[in-house]
C-alpha cells in the first residue's frame, strides 16, 4: 500500500444521531430506536433478533440478506433502517404460517433439495416468493433471471431451478 | 468388551498417514451388491430441511448471548511490515468500546497450529491482523477500529512465487533463511528415468499452465462466538472440525480439554477452509476468557478473502513423451506453488501425475514458495484440481501432436494398478466412466461441422467438446465413533460428534441408522456438532465424513439392535435370533408373525435405555481404494467477445454405494459449479507493486450465478465398493470438482483450435489466445 | 460508516431546501442508496446529512409517454419499474435491454434511474484504501497497475470507466435531464453534457451544482422507424458490470441510415459517444461490411492500458452486433 492509508483522525463522533423507527415485520408492528446509520439487516438481526436474513457481504454482492419490503425483494444490507419508516417487511421467519405450516416455496425447496449449507437459503426462498407473487407461472428463463441476485456457493442452483419449475407448474 | 488395537493407513487429501484403531467388538458385515435395503439408497429429503428453509437454523453468526460483544479487526495495509507502536487510547475511550487487543497487550496469544503469536510483531502480508476491537455494537467497533493509531516499519516484500524463490529475493519471514516452504523443498518424486523416457519418445509436448488463487467465499465467513463462565469455555464455531477447535482452543488458553466445549450446529459452507478454530476462533475465545463477556468475531467478507484462505496458485510445467502409437514414455511435472506467507504444507498437485496414466518414467517436482500474501487453505481437493487441469490439457496437446483421439490416448495408457504403491486398486471403473460419458456427450460427433460451427453472432460462435479424468481417495477411515440409544418408546437417538457442513451428513447417518435398526426414518434422530456430548469424529472434509462416520453409526445401530432383540427375546421367551425389527415392529423371522412394536417392549423396562457404541474399523490393507470418474464438457466460445459459455456437463463418478441419491446429486452439482467457476472466472488479483489483493470481495471476485449453470447430466453408478468400508460407500465431496476445470479447458481448446495456457478462461484470456 | 443526520424530503424542492441547510459538501441526497451506502460503509464518502428523497415518490416516481412520443422518467423511477413497463418494452426496447442485465433483481428494485447516472466508478483502487487521484490524492494507481477493467478512451488523469448501463443508452437516445435548483429554479441539460470527465478541480464524472437535485429524465420522441439495440459484454452471465457495452440507435428510411447514435459504456469515465461513426453511417445502407467498418473506425483512437487491450476487439465485436441488431439484421 502506498504511503499507508491516511490515519487522519476521523473526528470521532461523540453522540451518533438516533431515530425512532416504526416497522411492521411479518405482520407485527415494532418501534425501535436505532442509529441513523443502522442498516435494515442489522436492525432485523440485532434489534429484533430475527436472524433469518444473513450477512454475506454487506455490499449488495451476495443476496444472503434478501428480505421483502412491501412484497419486493431487496437487499437489507444496503437499506437504512430509517428509510423503512412505516414499511411492511417480510423476513424468512414470517413466511410459514403461525401454526408452523410451510409456505409452498419452502416445501418445494426441501422436496427438491434446493439447499445445501442453507446459509443463502432464506434469501433464495424470499427471492422466489417475490417472483411468484408477480408472475405465478414463470418460464425457466424468468426463474433464472429472478434468482440471479442470490449467490449460492454450495451450488444448489440446479435444484433451485427444479424447485422453481415445480412451483411454476412445469412438468418435471 | 475386549479392546484390540490395529494399525491401519489413512489418506487425507492425498497424504497418507499411519493410524491406530481401537476396536471394541466387531463391525457388521459389509452391505454387498445383494443387500436388501429399504432406506439406504432412496432419494431422501434432508431431515433438517425445515430448519434451513424457515430461518430456524442457528448459524454461528446468529448466536446472540446476553451481553455479547462484537469484534472488528484492524489489519495491516502493508505487504510486509513490523508493528512498532499501537496507540489505542482514543479508541478505548469511545462509546461502547470494551477493549482493544493488540501486540502490546495480547502478545501472549499463541496460535498452536502455527506456533506463532496471533498478534505477531512481523506482519507478513497485507491483511495480517494488528488489533481487535471489542464493542457493544458493530458500528462502535468499526468506529473504534478507525481510531486506532498504528506505526509500522515497512519491510521489503515479494508476492511473485518465482521471484520469491530467487536467492536475492526479500525474505517473506525475516527469521527464515529462504522463502522455500521448508528445507525439504523442492521435493522430487521419481520413478524410472524421465530424461531417458523423453529421449526415447517419438513425440514430445511441453506445456506451461497457470492456475489462479481462488478464494473459497463460503457464504458464511469464518468466525466464532465464545463464552467463558469461569469453568467452561464454550465456543460456537463455523467449523468443519469441532474436535480440532477444542484441542487448539484448550491449548491456546492453557485449559484442559474438558474445559472447552466446541459447538457447531449449522454452518454456511467451508469447502476445506474451516479446519480448526482459525485466528478468528482463537481470538473470540481469548477475548471472552479475558473479558468475561461473550464475544462474537465474524470476519468481514474482505478479511475473509485476504486472511482466511484460498486455493493456492500454481505455475506448472509439463513434459510428456510418447511413442507414435501413443504409449507414454515420460511424464514430468514441475509445480511452483504460491503458498502465501504462513503455509505449512504443499497441496497434492502431483497426486494424479503419479497415478493416472501407465508410465514407467515419472518425475514430479514440487517447489513451494512462500510469498507475502495471506495463507492458503485446503479448498475442495486442494492441488488435485489444479494438477489434473494442467495434466489433462497437456494430454490433449499430446493427442493433437500424435493425431490421436484424446480419449483413445487415455485408454491406451490406462493404469490398471497403483503404480507407485505397486498394488491393485480395490476397484477402478474409469474405463466405464469414459465409455458412458463419451456416449452421453456425443463424443463421436465432436468434430462434426454442424456441431462445431453453430449459427448466430455473425459466424463467430464455436463449440467444443472436451473431457478430463478424476481420481481421489474418499474411503475415509478411523478413528470415528458413534453411539446409538434406543429410548423406551422405541425411537432412537444417534450420538456423534461429526459436523454437517451442508453435505447432508445428518440425513445419511439417519438413513443408515434407521436401516440397521429396522426403524422408520422418522424414528431416528441424529445428534452432532457438540464436543460435550458427541463422540470423537474426524474433521468433515476430504470426502471423509460418510465413509468414516457411516460405518461407526452402522455398527452402533447394529449393536443396539442386537441388544434390543436380546431383551425382547427374554421378554417373550424366544431366542433373540428368531426375532427381527422391521419398520419399528418386532417380527418372528421364520413365521413372519408381527409381535407388536419395539416400543411396547422397551417401555416395560422402567426407563432403561439400550445404548451401544460403534466405531469405524481399519481400512483395507494391500489395496488402494479410490473414487474414479470422468467428466465431459460441451462449451460455446464467442470469438468476437471471448466469452465462454458451458452448455453441458456429463459427470460419471464411481463413489461406491450411493446412500442418498438426492443429496449425492446435489454434491455432484455443487462440485461441478465450483469447478466451472474456477475454470471460467475465479481469480485473485494482486497489485504486484503493493502486494495488495484488489478483489477481496464478491463484486470483483466473481463466482457463478444461477445463470452460469449449464445442463448437468449425472450418471449414477451406485455399486458398493466392498473394500471401502461396511457401507460400500465412498465420499462424494471432492470427486465432482476435480475434473471439471480440465474438461472445460479441453473443450475450449477444442472450440478455438488452440491450446489454453491456464485458468481462468476469462474473455480477456480468450481474446489474447486468439490474437 | 460515519454517523450522519437523516431527513426526509417529499418533493424535489424540499430536497433542494434541505440540502442547502446541510452545507455544500456535507449533505447528500440518498435515493435507493445502493451506491451511496456502500461508499459510506467504506468511508469513501462521509456526508454529515442525508436527505432521503424516496418519500417524494408520489411526485417523482413515474414513467409517462407524452402525446408526441417523448418518454418522461421520474428521477425516482427504479430500474425495475423501467424493466417491467410494457410500453417501454414495446416502444423503446433498447431501454428495457439496458436495465434487464444491470445489477440484480433486488438492486433494480431499489436503484433509481437518476441515482444510476450518478453512481461512482468501480475502480478497485477508488473503492479500496488507496488515496488515489479521484479521491483527492496525487496519483492514479490504475494507470500503471491493475487496469484490466479500465478505460481505453479519454484524457482524464483518471482511467476508471463509467459503470452505468443506463447512461450510454440515454446518450444514444438524446435524453435530457431536468434539474431542480435553489429558489425553485430548474434547468434542462442533455444527458451527454451532464457527464464530463473528472478534472483537477472537479474530480467527479458528472456536473451538478451544490444543492441541485435531478427531477426527471426525458427521452425525446425518436424519429419514425428508429430502432436501437444495447449489447452488454460481461464476464459472467449476470451480476457483472459491463466490460464493454454498446448502445446503438438508428433511424432508417428506405434502407438508408438517416441518423445514427452510438455510445459505448465501460470504455471511458463517461459514456463514450462516437460521432465519427455516426457520420460514417449516415446516408449509407447498413450492411455487415459497413458495421465492421464502423466498428473499426470507432476503435481507431483507442489507447489501451497494460491489461485491457482485449477491450479493443471486444468492443469491435459488440459494436458490429449492436449496429446489425439495431438495423434488424440480427441472425
Ligand atoms: C453489486 C452492484 C452491482 C451493480 N451492477 C450494475 C450494473 O450492472 N449496471 C448498472 O448500471 N448499475 C449497476 N449497479 C449500480 C446501481 O444501479 C446504482 O447503484 C443505482 O442505480 C444507484 O441508484 P440509487 O437510487 O441506489 O442511488 P444512491 O445510491 O441513492 O445515490 C447515488 C448517488 O446519486 C445521488 N443522487 C441520487 N438521486 C439523486 C437525485 N435525484 N438528484 C441528485 N442526486 C441524486 C446520490 O446523492 C449519490 O451520490 C450496481 C450496484 C451494485 C451495488
Ligand atoms: S482510475 Fe481513477 S479511480 Fe482508479 S485509481 Fe486512477 S484515479 Fe483513482
Ligand atoms: S449481505 Fe446484502 S447482498 Fe450480501
Ligand atoms: S446452500 Fe450453501 S450457499 Fe447456498
Image (cartoon, grey):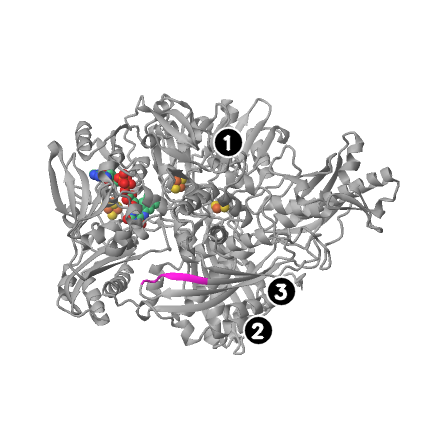
Mark 1 surroundings within 10 Å by alpha-carbon count, few (fewer than 14), some (14 through 19), many (20 or more):
some
Asked whether C260 or B586 is in front, the reply is B586
Residue B200 position, x and y percent, is: 53, 75
Q: Where is residue B712 in the image (x, y as percent from the top left)?
A: 50, 60
Segment colored magenta: B641-647
The stretch drawn in magenta includes residue B645: yes
Q: Earlier in the sequence, mark 1 or mark 3?
A: 1
Q: What chain does mark 2 sit on?
A: B
Q: Position of residue C3 (x, y in %)?
A: 30, 28
Q: Nearer the viewer, residue B384 or B149?
A: B384
Q: Are marks 1 and 3 in contact (CB under 8 Å)?
A: no
Q: Nearer the viewer, mark 2 or mark 3?
A: 3
Question: The residue marked by circle 1 belongs to what chain?
Answer: B
Residue corresponding to mark 3: B429
Q: In which quarter of the image is residue B596?
A: top right
Looking at the image, how many numbered discs can be counted on the residues? Answer: 3
| Residue under label 2 | B412
Question: Residue drawn at (55%, 72%), measured in percent from left and top?
Answer: B329
In the figure, B106 relative to C297: above or below?
Answer: above
The residue tagged 1 is: B63
SS for callout 3 = loop
How many residues crowd around disc 2 within 10 Å: few (fewer than 14), some, or many (20 or more)?
Answer: some
- Mark pair 1, 2: CA separation: 56 Å
Q: Please report whichever mark, 2 or 3, sits nearer to the chain's N-terminal start.
A: 2
Quarter containing the C terminus of chain C: bottom left
- Is B336 on the left or on the right of B622, as rendered? left
Residue in the picture at 42% in, 49% down: A136
| Residue B173 visible in this rendered orientation of the protein | no
**Distance from label 2 to label 3 (Cα)?**
15 Å
Chain of the residue where label 3 is placed in the rendered structure: B
Which residue ends up furthest to the right in the rendered image? B573
Amino acid at each position: 500500500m502506498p504511503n499507508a492509508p491516511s490515519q487522519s483522525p476521523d473526528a470521532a463522533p461523540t453522540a451518533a444521531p438516533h431515530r425512532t423507527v416504526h416497522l411492521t415485520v411479518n405482520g407485527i408492528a415494532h418501534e425501535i430506536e436505532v442509529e441513523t446509520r443502522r442498516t435494515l439487516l442489522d436492525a432485523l438481526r440485532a434489534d429484533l433478533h430475527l436472524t433469518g436474513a444473513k450477512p454475506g457481504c454487506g455490499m449488495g454482492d451476495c443476496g444472503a440478506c434478501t428480505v421483502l419490503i412491501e412484497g419486493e425483494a431487496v437487499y437489507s444490507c444496503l437499506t437504512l433502517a430509517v428509510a423503512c419508516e412505516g414499511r411492511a417487511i417480510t423476513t424468512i421467519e414470517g413466511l410459514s404460517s403461525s401454526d408452523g405450516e410451510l409456505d409452498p416455496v419452502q416445501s418445494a425447496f426441501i422436496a427438491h433439495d434446493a439447499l445445501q449449507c442453507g446459509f443463502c437459503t432464506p434469501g433464495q426462498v424470499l427471492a422466489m416468493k417475490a417472483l411468484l407473487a408477480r408472475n405465478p407461472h414463470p418460464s425457466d428463463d424468468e426463474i433464472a433471471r429472478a434468482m440471479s441476485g442470490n449467490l449460492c456457493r454450495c451450488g444448489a442452483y440446479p435444484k433451485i431451478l427444479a424447485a422453481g419449475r415445480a412451483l411454476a407448474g412445469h412438468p418435471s | 468388551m475386549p479392546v484390540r488395537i490395529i494399525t491401519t493407513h489413512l489418506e487425507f487429501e492425498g497424504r497418507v498417514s499411519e493410524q491406530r484403531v481401537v476396536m471394541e467388538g466387531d463391525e457388521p458385515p459389509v452391505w454387498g451388491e445383494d443387500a436388501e435395503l429399504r432406506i439406504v439408497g432412496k432419494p431422501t429429503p434432508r431431515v433438517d430441511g425445515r430448519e434451513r428453509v424457515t430461518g430456524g437454523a442457528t448459524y454461528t453468526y446468529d448466536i446472540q448471548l446476553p451481553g455479547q460483544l462484537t469484534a472488528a479487526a484492524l489489519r495491516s495495509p502493508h505487504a510486509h511490515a513490523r508493528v512498532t507502536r499501537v496507540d489505542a487510547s482514543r479508541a478505548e475511550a469511545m462509546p461502547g468500546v470494551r477493549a482493544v487487543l493488540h501486540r502490546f497487550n495480547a502478545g501472549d496469544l499463541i496460535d498452536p497450529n502455527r506456533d506463532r503469536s496471533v498478534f505477531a510483531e512481523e506482519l507478513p502480508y497485507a491483511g495480517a491482523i494488528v488489533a481487535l476491537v471489542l464493542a457493544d455494537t458493530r458500528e462502535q467497533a468499526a468506529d473504534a477500529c478507525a481510531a486506532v493509531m498504528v506505526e509500522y516499519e515497512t519491510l521489503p516484500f515479494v508476492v511473485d512465487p518465482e521471484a520469491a524463490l530467487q536467492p536475492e529475493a526479500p525474505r517473506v519471514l525475516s527469521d527464515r533463511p529462504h522463502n522455500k516452504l521448508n528445507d525439504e523443498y523442492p521435493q522430487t518424486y521419481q520413478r524410472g528415468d524421465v530424461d531417458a523416457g523423453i529421449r526415447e519418445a517419438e513425440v514430445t509436448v511441453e506445456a506451461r499452465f497457470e492456475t489462479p488463487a481462488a478464494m473459497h467465499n463460503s457464504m458464511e465467513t469464518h468466525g466464532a462466538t465464545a463464552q467463558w463462565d469461569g469453568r467452561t469455555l464454550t465456543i460456537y464455531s463455523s467449523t468443519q472440525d469441532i474436535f480440532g477447535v477444542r484441542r487448539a482452543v484448550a491449548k491456546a488458553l492453557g485449559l484442559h480439554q474438558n474445559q472447552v466445549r466446541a459447538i457447531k450446529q449449522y454452518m454456511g459452507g467451508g469447502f476445506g477452509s474451516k479446519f480448526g478454530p482459525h485466528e478468528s476462533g482463537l481470538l473470540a475465545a481469548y477475548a471472552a476468557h479475558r473479558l468475561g463477556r461473550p464475544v462474537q468475531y465474524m470476519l468481514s467478507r474482505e478479511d475473509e478473502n485476504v486472511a482466511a484462505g484460498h486455493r493456492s496458485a500454481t505455475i506448472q510445467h509439463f513434459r510428456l513423451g510418447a511413442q507414435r502409437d501413443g504409449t507414454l514414455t515420460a511424464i514430468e511435472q514441475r509445480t511452483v506453488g504460491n503458498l502465501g506467507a504462513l503455509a505449512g504444507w504443499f497441496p497434492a498437485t502431483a497426486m494424479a501425475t503419479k497415478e493416472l496414466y501407465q508410465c514407467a518414467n515419472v518425475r514430479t517436482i514440487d517447489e513451494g514458495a512462500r510469498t507475502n500474501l495471506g495463507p492458503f487453505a485446503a479448498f475442495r481437493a486442494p492441488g488435485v484440481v489444479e494438477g489434473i487441469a494442467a495434466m489433462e490439457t497437456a494430454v490433449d496437446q499430446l493427442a493433437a501432436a500424435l493425431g490421436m483421439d484424446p480419449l483413445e490416448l487415455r485408454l491406451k495408457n490406462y493404469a490398471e494398478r497403483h503404480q507407485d504403491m505397486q498394488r491393485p486398486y480395490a476397484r477402478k471403473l474409469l474405463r466405464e466412466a469414459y465409455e458412458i460419458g463419451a456416449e452421453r456427450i456425443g463424443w463421436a460427433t465432436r468434430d462434426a461441422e454442424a456441431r462445431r460451427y453453430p449459427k448466430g453472432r455473425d459466424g463467430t460462435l464455436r463449440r467444443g467438446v472436451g473431457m478430463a479424468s478424476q481420481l481421489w481417495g474418499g474411503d475415509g477411515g478411523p478413528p470415528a465413533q458413534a453411539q446409538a440409544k434406543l429410548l423406551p418408546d422405541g425411537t432412537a437417538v444417534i450420538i456423534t460428534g461429526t459436523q454437517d457442513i451442508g453435505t447432508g451428513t445428518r440425513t445419511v447417518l439417519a438413513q443408515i441408522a434407521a436401516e440397521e435398526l429396522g426403524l422408520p426414518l422418522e424414528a431416528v434422530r441424529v445428534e452432532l456438532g457438540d464436543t460435550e456430548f458427541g463422540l470423537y469424529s474426524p474433521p468433515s472434509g476430504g470426502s471423509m465424513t460418510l465413509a468414516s462416520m457411516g460405518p461407526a453409526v452402522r455398527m452402533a445401530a447394529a449393536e443396539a439392535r442386537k441388544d434390543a432383540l436380546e431383551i425382547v427375546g427374554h421378554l417373550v421367551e424366544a431366542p433373540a435370533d428368531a426375532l427381527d425389527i422391521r419398520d419399528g415392529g418386532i417380527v418372528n423371522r421364520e413365521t413372519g408373525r408381527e409381535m407388536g412394536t419395539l416400543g411396547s417392549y422397551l417401555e416395560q423396562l422402567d426407563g432403561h435405555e439400550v445404548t451401544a457404541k460403534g466405531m469405524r474399523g481399519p481400512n483395507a490393507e494391500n489395496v488402494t481404494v479410490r473414487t474414479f470418474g470422468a467428466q465431459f464438457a460441451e462449451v460455446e466460445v464467442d470469438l468476437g467477445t471471448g466469452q465462454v459459455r458451458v452448455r453441458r456437463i456429463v459427470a460419471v463418478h464411481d463413489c461406491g454405494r450411493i446412500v442418498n441419491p438426492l443429496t449425492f446429486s446435489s454434491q455432484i452439482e455443487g462440485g461441478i459449479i465450483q469447478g466451472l467457476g474456477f475454470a471460467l472466472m475465479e481469480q485473485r488479483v494482486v497489485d504486484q507493486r503493493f502486494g495488495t489483493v484488489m478483489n477481496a470481495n464478491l463484486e470483483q471476485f466473481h463466482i457463478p450465478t444461477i445463470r452460469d449453470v449449464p445442463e448437468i447430466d449425472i450418471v449414477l453408478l451406485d455399486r458398493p465398493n466392498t473394500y471401502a468400508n461396511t457401507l460400500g460407500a465412498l465420499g462424494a465431496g471432492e470427486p465432482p470438482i476435480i475434473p471439471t476445470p480440465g474438461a472445460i479447458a479441453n473443450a475450449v481448446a477444442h472450440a478455438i483450435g488452440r491450446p489454453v495456457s491456464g485458468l481462468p478462461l476469462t474473455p480477456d484470456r480468450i481474446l489474447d489466445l486468439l490474437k | 460508516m460515519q454517523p450522519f443526520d437523516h431527513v426526509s424530503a417529499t418533493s424535489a424542492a424540499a430536497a433542494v431546501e434541505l440540502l442547502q441547510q446541510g452545507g455544500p459538501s456535507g449533505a447528500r441526497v440518498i435515493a435507493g442508496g445502493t451506491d451511496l451506502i456502500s461508499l459510506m460503509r467504506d468511508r469513501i464518502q462521509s456526508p454529515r446529512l442525508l436527505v432521503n428523497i424516496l418519500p417524494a415518490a408520489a411526485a417523482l416516481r413515474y414513467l409517462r409517454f407524452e402525446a408526441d412520443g417523448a418518454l418522461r422518467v421520474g428521477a425516482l423511477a427504479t430500474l425495475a419499474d423501467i424493466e417491467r413497463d410494457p410500453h417501454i418494452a414495446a416502444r423503446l426496447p433498447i431501454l428495457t435491454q439496458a436495465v434487464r442485465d444491470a445489477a440484480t433483481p433486488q438492486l433494480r428494485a431499489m436503484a433509481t434511474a437518476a441515482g444510476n447516472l450518478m453512481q461512482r466508478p468501480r475502480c478497485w483502487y477508488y473503492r479500496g484504501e488507496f488515496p488515489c487521484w479521484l479521491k483527492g490524492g496525487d496519483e492514479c494507481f490504475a494507470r500503471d497497475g491493475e487496469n484490466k477493467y479500465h478505460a481505453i478512451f479519454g484524457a482524464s488523469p483518471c482511467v476508471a470507466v463509467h459503470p452505468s448501463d443506463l447512461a450510454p443508452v440515454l446518450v444514444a437516445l438524446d435524453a435530457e435531464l431536468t434539474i431542480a435548483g435553489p429558489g425553485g429554479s430548474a434547468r434542462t441539460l442533455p444527458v451527454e453534457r451532464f457527464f464530463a470527465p473528472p478534472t483537477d478541480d472537479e474530480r467527479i464524472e458528472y456536473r451538478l451544482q451544490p444543492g441541485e437535485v435531478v427531477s426527471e429524465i426525458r427521452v425525446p420522441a425518436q424519429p419514425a422507424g428508429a430502432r436501437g439495440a444495447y449489447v452488454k459484454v460481461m464476464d459472467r452471465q449476470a451480476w457483472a458490470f459491463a466490460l464493454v457495452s454498446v448502445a446503438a440507435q438508428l433511424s432508417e428510411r428506405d434502407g438508408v441510415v438517416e441518423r445514427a447514435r452510438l455510445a459505448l459504456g465501460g470504455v471511458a469515465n463517461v459514456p463514450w459517444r462516437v460521432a465519427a461513426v455516426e457520420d460514417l453511417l449516415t446516408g449509407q445502407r447498413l450492411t455487415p461490411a459497413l458495421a465492421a467498418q464502423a466498428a473499426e473506425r470507432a476503435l481507431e483512437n483507442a489507447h489501451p492500458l497494460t491489461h485491457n487491450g482485449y477491450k479493443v476487439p471486444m468492443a469491435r465485436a459488440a459494436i458490429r452486433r449492436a449496429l446489425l441488431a439495431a438495423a434488424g439484421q440480427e441472425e
